[in-house]
Amino acid sequence: MIDLLLAATLVTTFPIEHLHDPRPLPAAASVRDVIATGADDFILATGPDDELDGRTLMRVSGQRVTPLVALAPARSGICRGSGLVAGEEGRWWYARCNHEEVEFVPSGAPSQVVRVPVGEQSVGLAPIRGSDPAVVVVSHVPSSELMMRAELVTPSGAQMIGDFRRSGHLGFGPWTMQAHRLKDDAIALVTLEEDGHSDYRVMLRVFRDGEATESRLPFETNRYVAVLSAASEHGLGVVAVLPSGGGLVAMAFDPNEPQNAKPFEIDGSDAQMVARAGAAIVPLGERFAVTWANANDRSVRLSEFDRTMALPAVHVAAEADVRMHAPLLQAHEEGMSVFWSLGTTRQRVLPTEAAGYLLAVELWRRLGSGAVP
């Protein structure tokens, strides 16, 4: 359970002179995604707003920016989806869907793009977070209007993991579909689907032994604009994003018992959400952290939640420019990094108990005494 009295402990543990202040990364044009691979080492994905128009991967070490590989515009706009993923010990990989292929860029040989054929009816790709490159590709089943096919694709090849019947219109972007590997090696697919009558469903499908178990997650029926999810050995965390004024609703649960999931509204997330910018989510043991940008004041905010509660939103940064990329989150041994764009990409490294720490810092500043009574 999240400790609501953590603020006092954190003020003592993290002195005021170590506030983990934001720092800018060296300037790079049109940054769309970024991950940290070391204390002063980053991988950036840059390019036009639409991922289909091409991407260039760059390494930033200190003040040095080194291009690694340039991926040409995709040959077709049918299949969408990409991901820049951080692994262990500085490893990373990138993948994108390009017409009837998945293109992998591994950290060990970034100039050698690995291309894996997939079906011609492929429409969406979702990366699976982890050190080993893997994605789920979803395609239409031939001669069927509603049946979809899921394939697990790695640099070694593609393997069908099961078919499923979509419950309505299914988008194939990063804000409407995510894939995860569960601790028993099953594959989970979280999607946002709409039946044409403004009935939006957040669906969970778990693939084991070629079969899919389907559940509708217990979010209230509403007009959600995005869904985000993350997985850990303790379970799944899912956040549904409401349109302007609605805020965020979060739940954490055992993927084998989704019916027991309990949704929590995140206090402080009710300002108008920038739907285009979206949000980001990472696992932190039994908890999950989520960050997003608000449209009314352009601030970057963060909250944490688990199966029993959600903490109120706290401020990470006063301002962000969401035209380049959404606020991004990455968990690592030191805690977590929050990235956002403001002129250039900026990073703030926070301890694992980030929400409590930021609450403690704000309390310290308001009291002005350096201690919590």
Image (tube, rainbow, N blue to C red):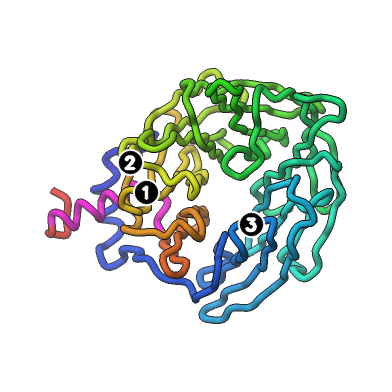
Check the image and name the residue furthest to the bottom: 64
Question: Label 2, label 1: how many angstroms apart (C-alpha)?
Answer: 7 Å
From the image, tell me which residue sits under label 2. Answer: 271
Q: Are marks 3 and 1 in contact (CB under 8 Å)?
A: no
Q: Is residue 147 above or below residue 5?
A: above
Q: Secondary structure at mark 1?
A: loop
Q: Position of residue 370 (x, y in %)?
A: 17, 59
Residue type (three-letter) at the residue carrying disc 3 = Leu
Judge depth for marks 2 and 3 and give the one in front. 2
**Viewer can see residue 80:** yes
Residue type (three-letter) at the residue carrying disc 1 = Ala
Label 2: how many residues lie within 10 Å, few (<14), some (14-19) or many (20+)? some
Disc sitting over residue 84 in the figure: 3
From the image, tell me which residue sits under label 1. Answer: 295
Q: Position of residue 124 (x, y in %)?
A: 72, 42
Q: Which residues are magenta?
A: 350-367
* Quadrant housing residue 161: top right
Q: Are marks 2 and 3 in contact (CB under 8 Å)?
A: no
Check the image and name the residue furthest to the top: 259
Q: Is 364 inside the magenta-drawn segment?
A: yes
* Quadrant housing residue 246: top left
Q: Is residue 81 above or below residue 245?
A: below
Instruction: Locate residue 372 relative to residue 124 in the image: left or right.
Output: left
Disc sitting over residue 164 in the figure: none
Q: Residue at x 70, y 33 (%)?
A: 184
Q: Which of these two is toward me, 107 or 328? A: 328
- Which is nearer the N-term, disc 2 or disc 3? 3
What secondary structure is the stretch in magenta mostly built from?
A: helix
Question: Label 3, label 1: how many angstroms apart (C-alpha)?
Answer: 26 Å
Q: Residue at x 66, y 75 (%)?
A: 67
Residue type (three-letter) at the residue carrying disc 2 = Ala
Q: Is 181 inside the magenta-drawn segment?
A: no
